[in-house]
Amino acid sequence: MAIAIALVVIVVASVLFHFVSPWWATPLASNWKQMDDTLTITLVITGFFFIVINLFIGYVVWRYRHRAGHRAAYQPENRKLELWLIGLTAIGIIAMLAPGLIVYADYVRPPRDAMVVEVVGQQWQWAFRFPGKSGQLGTSDARFVTATNPLGINPDDPRGQDNIIVVGPEVHLPLNRPVKVLLRSKDVLHDFYVPPIRARMNMVPGMVTSFWFTPTQAGKFDILCAQLCGVGHYNMRGHMVVEDQASFDAWLAKQQTFAMTMAKTAPPMAAAPGTAATPTPETTVASGTDLVEQGRALAQSKGCVACHSVDGKPGVGPTWKGLYGSTQTFADGSSAPVDDAFLKTEIVDPHARLIKGFGPLMPPMPVSDAEVAALTAYIRSLGSGAAATPQAGK
């Protein structure tokens, strides 16, 4: 009897909690109302069976409770009952799956006039690419990935030269314009997810997946990774800014093209034999400034910024703001000032010594002396600190 009462209480409490629950979906900000409708259908069907089955079990427990002089009748099979159960189960599954299949078919079939944007995922950061004036994206491949070409765009493909590169956590999109999203991953499985847009899709290494949506509300929305992708998964966040077409065009015009990013790293032309090289404004830029910019690009392409913040906020690893010049304490109680030699050791062999309070999370990665110098210059540019605070980590 107590079990029957408990089942009824569970059903009533579950239904009440559903209607008063604070965990409702975020307000819809795209054209995908069908997503909400599909979710509602699923909740209604599963909720109906949850209520019916639990009330039925409660009734059976009460109706056929043990009483003296009564024995349970053994009935090995009941074909009529089996047919009813198979039929109702099949109808319920079809009712749940059919709307989802119909919506998904539309979800991956974008309009012809949809704007294209590519999203590239890497532990634990986002990058984006837009077609340039040519209206086409250049080809890409993992073998082209370098510190100055983090998206792996084919430098020999003329269609990619005017592609607009956004290496950072924020992307802008125009309001009320269909957007086709191409997704690829540089390392492990990720999932691009914007809850108010109702848009998400797995990013599978070696594949290009896609979907489309039309943003219908201006605002700033969180971009999340919805697949566990490593220790920094929780920190793989970004922002999608939806704005009017004029504001979007102005933002896009400020971004660099692929050709511009490659030109910045191209070596200066050698002087003709027998003549002296004439310094130009481009070649007389201080080498320190060049190193800082190269270090900034390396920090993005190698995923350093996913664990090491540059604004003082805590993360998986240390904040780089004010790190240079501070004194760090190791797990064995010794300490050392953060200088060029300190940073080189930590970058080249991150597990050689552990900073107190941090574990061996940073994976070893091949870096050249030039890359170490660039990263060091970038960290140094973020300010010096003298406080002996154990904030560096792996």
Image (spheres, rainbow, N blue to C red):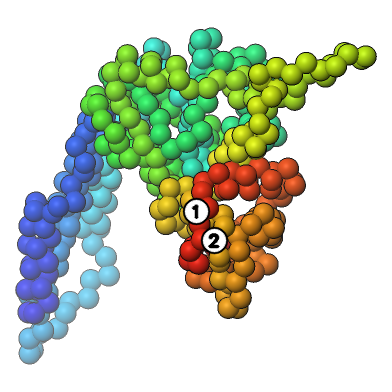
User: What percent of the width, then of the height, locates residue 295?
Assistant: 61, 40
Q: Secondary structure at mark 2?
A: loop
Q: Residue furthest bottom?
A: 68
Read off the residue under disc 1.
322
Pointers 1 and 2 in contact (CB under 8 A)?
A: yes
Q: Residue at x 7, y 90 (%)?
A: 68
User: What percent of the width, then of the height, locates residue 215?
Assistant: 29, 25
Instruction: Let me know if residue 204 appears in the view.
Output: no
Mark 2 is on which residue type? Answer: Ser
Asked whether, in this view, residue 188 is left or right of residue 112, the answer is: right
Query: Crowdedness of circle 1 by 10 Å Cα count: few (<14), some, many (20+)?
Result: many
Whether 133 is drawn above or below 340: the answer is above
Whether 300 is drawn above or below 15: the answer is above
Asked whether, in this view, residue 171 is left or right of residue 24, the answer is: right
Mark 1 is on which residue type? Answer: Gly
User: What percent of the width, then of the height, locates residue 329?
Assistant: 56, 71
C-alpha span from label 1 to label 2 = 7 Å
Q: Nearer the viewer, residue 78 or 57?
A: 57
User: What percent of the width, then of the height, locates residue 39?
Assistant: 23, 41
Instruction: Let me know if residue 62 appears in the view.
Output: yes
Q: Residue at x 40, y 34 (%)?
A: 170
Q: Nearer the viewer, residue 8 or 246?
A: 246
Whether 243 is drawn above or below 170: the answer is above
Read off the residue under disc 2.
326
Q: Residue at x 53, y 9 (%)?
A: 134
Query: Crowdedness of circle 2 by 10 Å Cα count: few (<14), some, many (20+)?
Result: some
